[in-house]
Image (spheres, rainbow, N blue to C red):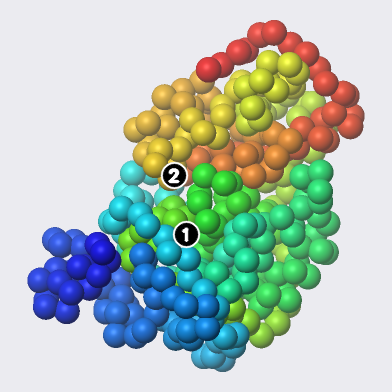
Amino acid sequence: MIAALLLISLAGGICTVGGCGGGDDAWAASAQSFIGSDAPISGVSQNQNTPSSSFKVGVPESGKVNTTRSQTIPNIGAEYVQPDSRTELFLSPQLIEPMNSFPGNDVVLDVSNQRSPGEAHIAGAVRIPSKSFLYDNGTLRPVSELVAQLGKAGISDKDAVVVYSDTFSSGEAAFVLWMLRYLGQENVRALDGGLQDWTAASLPLQTKENVRPQSKYVPHLRPELLFDYDSIKSGKAQLVDARTFQDYGKSRIPNAIFIGPESLLEGGRIKAASNLNDTFARLSRSQTVAVYSNDLLNASLVWYALQLMGFDSGTYTWQDWQAHEGAVVTSNNMAA
């Protein structure tokens, strides 16, 4: 209902596209062209066999997006979300993509694990579930497999990429962003929020599955983003445990402090810098931070927040530590 009223007011020239009294000009122009199409809007359901055109975001260089027939759009009821920009809230905002800035020719990558083909997604997005980059035990697949999947999906190391998932709190988008940075992707950002927020803001959706021409992905590894056992053992990095507090209490790497991913989130998005300062108060900006977990999604969420706050940081896996030393139990350095 809110989305419908918004469209009516827009048609009458009462409000800007970003909501009454707001909105970026470039974003508004793109959204206005979308409004003239029959792409689905938040809160509007479609019959399974109803076709849908789409607002093309992230169109390949060929200028064409191959799609399959639309299937269904879930009826998502949510309070309207203002598609604002929060980049000014962070010390190093280069890894964040505001919802009020349409990605243009950037590749939009949907890494949701729960969404099925035919369900609504951001218009123009291609999909690679984040779990396809991981083994069943949560560890990263070999670089050769990672780049093969990216190339098959039509993503090259030269592309500008915007990553998102159903909800940012799942850690799926943060993990894939970290992985792309590890592979050497220069221009990659995570959407400030998830599909849930995008939908609640009545931004362009489609149900067609997009296919890009295959490309060659050439990795330029940044090993400093993935710690190994020797670098952790050296004691040169500050250690952050991003597992559950229960796991931290049972066993952990000596001298690690606990920072749970949930403590960094508010309303499904990363907290503003003013709130993160307290969370990271025990960490020194002059020393590298290694975030470890038995789940790279959780480790990547903490890593992402550290990056936005200007920390030099990377990730490590609890599985690798256990493989070398087993569980080391300590009773100090407990942190809430």
Q: Quick check: can you spot residue 150?
A: yes
Residue 160 locus on image (x, y percent)? 53, 70
Residue shown at 33% from the left, 61% from the top: 201
Instruction: Give the position of the N terminus as an image quadrant.
Output: bottom left
The image's mark for residue 115 is none
- Give the secondary structure at mark 1: helix
**Distance between the Cα atoms at labels 2 and 1?**
11 Å
**Total marks in image:** 2
**What's the residue type where badge 1 is placed?**
Leu
**In the rendered structure, which disc, 2 or 1, sits on the residue that comes first in sequence?**
1
Question: Relative to residue 18, is residue 215 depicted above or below?
Answer: below
Q: Quadrant of residue 20?
A: bottom left
Residue shown at 51% from the left, 33% from the top: 262
Q: Are marks 2 and 1 in contact (CB under 8 Å)?
A: no
The image's mark for residue 195 is 1
- Bin the neighbour count of mark 2 within 10 Å (Cα to Cα): few under 14, some 14-19, many 20 and up: some
- Give the secondary structure at mark 2: loop
Residue 73 locus on image (x, y percent)? 48, 71
Observer-nearest of 267 and 300: 267
45 lies left or right of 17: right
**What's the residue type where badge 2 is placed?**
Gly
- Bin the neighbour count of mark 1 within 10 Å (Cα to Cα): few under 14, some 14-19, many 20 and up: many
Residue 274 locus on image (x, y percent)? 34, 33
For disc 2, the marked residue is 268
Residue 116 locus on image (x, y percent)? 62, 66
Observer-nearest of 240 and 110: 110
